[in-house]
């Protein structure tokens, strides 16, 4: 398949772009003699940082919830298992709380010995052993056999994490899926993602899990979030400067205007000339910028959407499409991660208490599909 998109390069140069072998068609374009609403388009490629394929050189450090065994050498009765408290402090025998948050075991041992020597005559010798890790964890949610939050006791690859969760629900043929009637439970590998510190990592799950491509098998870091959405989902995501960022159910012929209306319209000050539509696998997304202002004025045809498309309404124009795409994907995966996480921890849909959302992160909670009150 060949697409007649236009690509705007990093420095604003307009280049013709022909993509072959794409599995997702771009938003439908009008005939040449009709004024187009499409301003520009950009196609990204999978970019794995080589550093992600190596385990972190940083040693393990203690944090809240970690359990350690401490014993005074030569005194078997002194052996206890204690937990690093929520304040990052460790309590042992006569000692007041010692701040060990961020310390390695090698650093914690002499600290305990130094403080304990204040209460005994002979310099003590202390043994400290890590018994359980709770401060480091990874989130594995969505269409996997055993979704949940898993402790990270050492270097862990993405494949190892997926194996911990029992694997995805996508490793059977489509014919078997239909026969078993489990279509709702299958994972969509094209839309699956890893979030790290609010950023979407461009991992190609299809290449990793179906083709065995180890160049996609990155090492995870604490608090990485892995999510496998349902392959049966037929929604459009509407984010950004709209009244209620949310999922809009897809129907045949749904357009950008219809999706924005499904989110109850745009906010005052929204930059309608740069409304974006993102389509395709998250590891190789395709971005189309639509002049929505021309669409709502009737000066250009609307753009037809497909299930899984992301519609993003910005508050300001973007000069570089690669940066614009990054902002959209980060907002999308953060929103999806927060909503999936709130369901796991049991946060009611009427609020977000108990979920930490960094200020300025761009994370948006997608509310239930309910219209705003009428005044």
Image (cartoon, grey):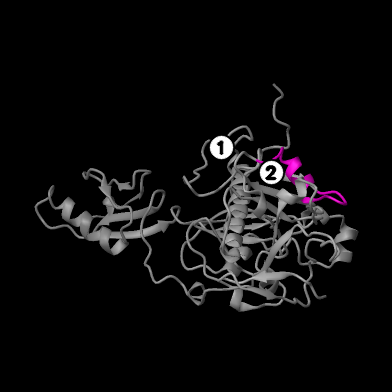
* Pick the front one: 187 or 75: 187
Lateral position of residue 32 relative to residue 38, left or right: right
The magenta segment is: 250-266
Q: Are marks 1 and 2 in contact (CB under 8 Å)?
A: no
How many tags in the picture?
Answer: 2
Crowd rating for badge 2 (residues with CA inside 10 Å; few <14, some 14–19, many 20+)? many
Using the image, tell me which numbered label, if any, was put on residue 162: none
Residue 137 seen from this side: yes
* Pick the front one: 328 or 5: 5
Q: Where does the image place residue 278, in percent across and percent down from the top left?
A: 70, 59
Location of residue 329 (image quadrant): bottom right
* Pick the front one: 153 or 16: 16
From mark 1 to mark 2, how far is it between C-alphas?
15 Å
Using the image, tell me which numbered label, if any, was put on residue 246: 2
Please check the rendered image and state whether residue 288 is part of the magenta-colored stretch, yes or no.
no
Write the residue at 74% across / 56% down.
Answer: 309
Write the residue at 10% across / 56% down.
Answer: 122
Instruction: Classify mark 1: helix, strand or loop.
Output: loop
Write the residue at 87% across / 58% down.
Answer: 180
Q: Where does the image place residue 177, in percent across and percent down from the top left?
A: 85, 61
Q: Where does the image place residue 127, in percent across and percent down from the top left?
A: 27, 60
Using the image, tell me which numbered label, if any, was put on residue 352: 1
């Amino acid at each position: 398949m060949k697409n007649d998109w236009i690509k705007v390069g990093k420095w604003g140069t307009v280049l013709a772009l022909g993509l072959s072998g794409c599995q997702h068609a771009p938003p439908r374009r009008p005939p040449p003699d009709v004024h187009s609403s499409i301003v520009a388009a950009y196609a990204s490629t999978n970019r794995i940082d080589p550093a992600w394929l190596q385990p972190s050189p940083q040693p393990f450090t203690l944090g809240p919830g970690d359990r350690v065994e401490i014993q005074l050498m030569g005194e078997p009765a002194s052996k206890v298992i204690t937990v690093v408290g929520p304040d990052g402090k460790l309590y042992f025998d006569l000692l007041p709380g010692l701040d060990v948050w961020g310390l390695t075991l090698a650093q914690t041992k002499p600290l305990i010995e130094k403080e304990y020597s204040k209460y005994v005559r002979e310099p003590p010798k202390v043994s400290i052993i890590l018994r359980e890790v709770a401060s480091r964890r990874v989130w594995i949610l969505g269409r996997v056999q055993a979704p949940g939050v898993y402790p990270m006791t050492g270097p862990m690859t993405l494949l190892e994490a997926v194996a911990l969760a029992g694997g995805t629900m996508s490793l059977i043929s489509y014919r078997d899926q239909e026969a078993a009637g489990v279509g709702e439970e299958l994972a969509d590998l094209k839309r699956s993602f890893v979030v790290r510190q609010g950023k979407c990592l461009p991992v190609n799950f299809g290449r990793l899990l179906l083709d065995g491509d180890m160049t996609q098998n990155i090492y995870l870091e604490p608090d990485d979030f892995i999510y496998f959405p349902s392959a049966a989902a037929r929604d459009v995501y509407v984010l950004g400067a709209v009244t209620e960022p949310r999922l809009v159910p897809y129907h045949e012929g749904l357009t950008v205007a219809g999706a924005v209306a499904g989110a109850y319209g745009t906010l005052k000050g929204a930059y309608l000339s740069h409304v974006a539509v993102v389509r395709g696998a998250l590891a190789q997304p395709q971005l189309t910028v639509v002049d929505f202002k021309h669409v709502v004025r009737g000066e250009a045809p609307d753009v037809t959407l497909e299930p899984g498309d992301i519609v993003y309404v910005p508050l300001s124009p973007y000069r570089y499409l690669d940066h614009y795409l990054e902002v959209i994907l980060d907002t999308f995966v953060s929103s999806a991660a927060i909503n999936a996480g709130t369901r796991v921890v049991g946060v009611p849909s009427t609020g977000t208490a108990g979920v930490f959302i960094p200020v300025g992160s761009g994370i948006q909670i997608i509310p239930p599909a309910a219209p705003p009150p009428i005044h």
